[in-house]
Image: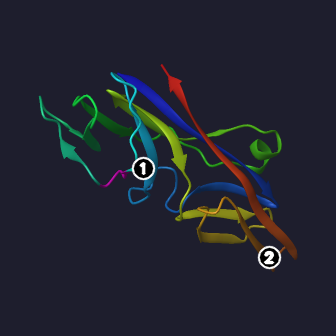
Amino acid sequence: MVNFMLKITAELDNLTNLQPQGGCDDADFSYLFKLKCGRCGELTQRETCVTLNDTVPLPVGKGTTHLIQKCKFCGRDGTVTMVQGRGTPLTNLESQSGKYAPLMLFDCRGYEPVDFVFNDGWKVESLEGTKFENVDLSSGEFDEYDEKGQCPVMISNVRATFDVVK
């Protein structure tokens, strides 16, 4: 069992608190990433989608997981289980200092998550308090104008990493 923390960062101009639409533990938010088999190293060709709402029973024992997938190369089964309560929004201060914010913890058995894909369903707020919802980061950026703060706001250079967590 290895835990991987998905961490994100971006350049936030006049913005703060970047996170999934319903918060870091949003049950409907789709996490898209590729998986690398822990046995043979094969990388999945397409992105895998995992959400907190979708669970399946474990094949052995009691309990559930969010994903069971068989490696197409070596045939080994692997699971990915999401662990709630460890994520925090990316703040303007973290963005300015180049730090990454933890978003979601994944308990992976037989697989390693790689190449997170930013999609739609994000929210962020301006430094003046204006909320921007259903932000689409699939192009890697977002720009708008904050009427309340009378300034442009922008998200650019979005990046993600998976770090091993003990």
Spatial separation of the CA atoms under disc 1 and disc 2: 33 Å
Residue 100 picture location, percent across and down: 68, 38
Q: Quadrant of residue 58?
A: top left
Marks 1, 2: nearer the viewer = 1
Per the image, the residue denoted by label 2 is: 145
Q: Amino acid at mark 1?
A: Glu
Q: Is residue 25 magenta?
A: no
Q: Secondary structure at mark 1?
A: loop
**Number of marks in the rendered image:** 2
Give the colouring mode of the picture.
Answer: rainbow
Quadrant of the rendered structure where residue 109 is? Answer: top left
Q: Is residue 71 left or right of residue 22?
A: left
Farthest residue, direction top: 166
Above or below, comparing residue 39 to residue 135 in the picture: above
The quarter of the displayed image where residue 135 is located = bottom right
User: Looking at the image, which residue sits at the far right?
Assistant: 150
The residue positioned 51% from the left and 24% from the top of the image is 164
Judged from the image, the secondary structure of the residue bearing numbered disc 2 is strand
Decide which of 142, 77 is in the foreground and name it: 77
The residue stretch that appears in magenta? 49-53
Give the percent coordinates (x, y) of residue 131.
Answer: 67, 70
Between residues 124 and 2, which one lies in front from this camera angle? 2
